[in-house]
Image (cartoon, grey):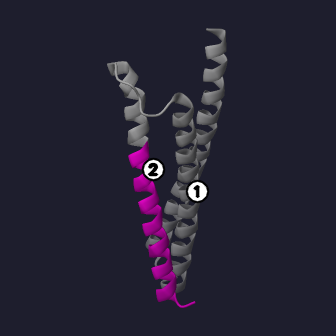
Amino acid sequence: MNTKKEEIKVFDIQMVVSIILAIVFFYSFLVNYNNKLPLIGKIPFWDKNKTFDISMVLRWLILITAIVSVYTAVKNYQIIEKNAPYDKEALNAEAMEIIGTILLVIAAFIGLEVISHRGRFEDLFEDIA
């Protein structure tokens, strides 16, 4: 595949990731608002289990988009390497982006683990109380 087509493919993937993240942020807002409703004396529109399920789906989407971001960062590095192999500054910047996206994957995985355990612990504490 030629470089121009590769760059377009990477941009298309990044746009899809941006749309997915916008949806994730919107639903995260709704989950937070839903959690606030009982505190202000109103009835939430989702029960606790539904909120947990939505949060889990959102965390999985974040993890998947983070992994896709690593892929696009690696593809960008390869494109720069192919087009401007002597541009060390651009290569270093893209290498730092790869490291950043790998750290994002780790953070997303930790967030997924935390929320999955939090749901189990909340059920345990409800049984005790």
Q: Position of residue 108 (x, y in %)?
A: 56, 46
- In the rendered image, residue 14 lying in the magenta stretch gets the answer yes
Residue plotted at (37% across, 20% down):
39
Q: Nearer the viewer, residue 94 or 111?
A: 111
In this image, 84 relative to 42: left or right?
right
Q: Disc 2 and disc 1: Cα gap in Å?
A: 12 Å
Q: Which numbered mark, 2 or 1, is in the foreground of this view?
A: 2
Instruction: Check disc 2 and give the amino acid type.
Output: Val
Q: Position of residue 40 (x, y in %)?
A: 32, 20
Number of numbered callouts drawn = 2
Give the main secondary structure, helix, strand or loop, of the magenta stretch.
Answer: helix
Residue 60 drawn above or below residue 78: above
Q: Quadrant of the C terminus?
A: top right
Compared with 34, 24 (above or below) is: below
Residue at position x 41%, y 48% in the image: 25
User: SS at mark 1?
Assistant: helix
Residue at 44% x, 74% y is 11
Looking at the rendered structure, the kind of residue marked 1 is Ile
Front one among 49 and 100: 49
Seen from the viewer's position, the closer of residues 100 and 43 is 43
Q: Position of residue 12 (x, y in %)?
A: 46, 74
Q: Which disc number belongs to residue 64?
A: 1
Q: Label for residue 24? A: 2
Residue range of the region highlighted in magenta in the rendering: 1-27
Near-viewer residue (36 or 63): 36
- Indicate the secondary structure of the residue bearing disc 2: helix
Tell me which corner region of the image, top left, top right, bottom left or bottom right, holds residue 37.
top left
Residue 60 shows in this picture:
yes
Examine the structure image and report whether residue 55 is included in the region drawn in magenta: no
